[in-house]
Amino acid sequence: MRAIAVLFMVEVHTAAIIPPEGVTVGDPAAFVAAAFGGMAAPMFVTISGWGMYMSARRRHSEGISASDWGRWIVPRVLLLVTCQVIVNLLLNVERGGRFEWQTPGVLTLLAIAAILSPFLSRMSFSARSTLMLLACASPLALGDAASPELGWFDRVGSEGASQWFQRLLVNGTYPVAPWIFYVLLGTIVFDLQGEPEAREKGIMMGLLATIATIFISVFEGMDWALTEGEAVLTFFPASMPFLVVSGTMVVLAMRLLEGSEAEGGEPSLGGSLAFLEPAGRLSLTIYVSHFAVLGLAALALDGEPRLSLASAFCVTIAHTLVWIPLAIAHERYMPSFSLESILRASQSGR
């Protein structure tokens, strides 16, 4: 799942930087790209939350000291924040990109998740479930604080520390409120690994809620989903219906791929997806590295659509899939050269 999540992110970012000529928002191709976009980041954050919670639970069960927690958390936070700055520089607005250098993003969100991991590992299932529901409802409480009027380049920019923290916490691209919902969702899914029926009940409730959002869209005459603007589901800022629908789709995808593995059987596709495992183990390295390629593409295209639909589609798919053999080759020939290796080497905590 981690490999699928990071490859979805590569696909979405590539489609955004290399858009085809003549494709409007209402075009079916644009709808398909938006659907992948709506799934990519929620899946990436949910799987990351799942992994951090698993690591924190293991360390908590070993009874490590506060200083050991610090040695585990601090290098992770520093690396994630540093990688966020690198990503911002690679795809900087001054070179046709999408980010200001100081923009908080998905990696700073994961840094916050890392800081919270020791506390989450000590919290009960019911307490985390309650927090998840509160995070899901937070768009309603935030209201205008989420700044729905902000355009993209306003949302990725900040002037001074106060505004930077606003972008980090409530009105950036991936603010803690409400995006911590997906981190908490990852912890819940982890705890329900051996209870597929409980997850299936949650999926059914989510699908019913998804159908309800479609009916609301039809009866209210609103767009069902838009990246931003007036719609039932919006990504910037993330609306409550978007959290429910995307969270449901993420858990559904995880359940479908799991098959009967929870009962001691085989995953749905057996071992046919084993070739993706190296990409999963290099998810952070792939995430950062693909922005280097996109930065060059943005510089060359200068923000203008220059390819036909077929050409843009082929380039997007090729750039997404090429990371699979690259990850396999990397693991075979240079396994110690990656951001993940730096993190392992820097962490002395148990």
Image (tube, rainbow, N blue to C red):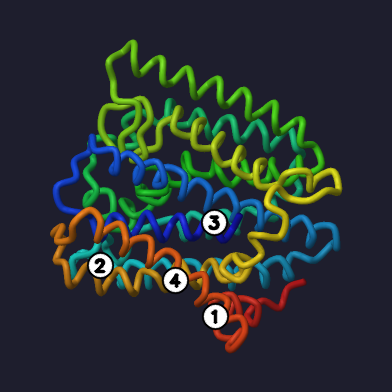
- The answer to which image quadrant residue 318 occupies is bottom left
Q: Are marks 4 and 3 in contact (CB under 8 Å)?
A: no
Q: Secondary structure at mark 4?
A: loop
- Residue assigned mark 4: 322
Residue, x 65% and y 52% (percent of image)? 50
The mark nearer the N terminus, 3 or 1, is 3
Compare residues 23 and 37 and report the one nearer the observer: 23
| Amino acid on which disc 2 is placed | Asn
Q: CA distance from mark 4 to mark 2?
A: 24 Å
Q: CA distance from mark 1 to mark 2?
A: 23 Å
- Residue assigned mark 2: 92
Residue, x 42% and y 64% (percent of image)? 320
| Amino acid on which disc 3 is placed | Ile
Compare residues 153 and 144 and report the one nearer the observer: 153
Q: Are marks 3 and 1 in contact (CB under 8 Å)?
A: no
| Amino acid on which disc 4 is placed | Val
Q: CA distance from mark 1 to mark 4?
A: 17 Å
The mark nearer the N terminus, 1 or 4, is 4
- State the residue lying farthest toward the bottom: 333
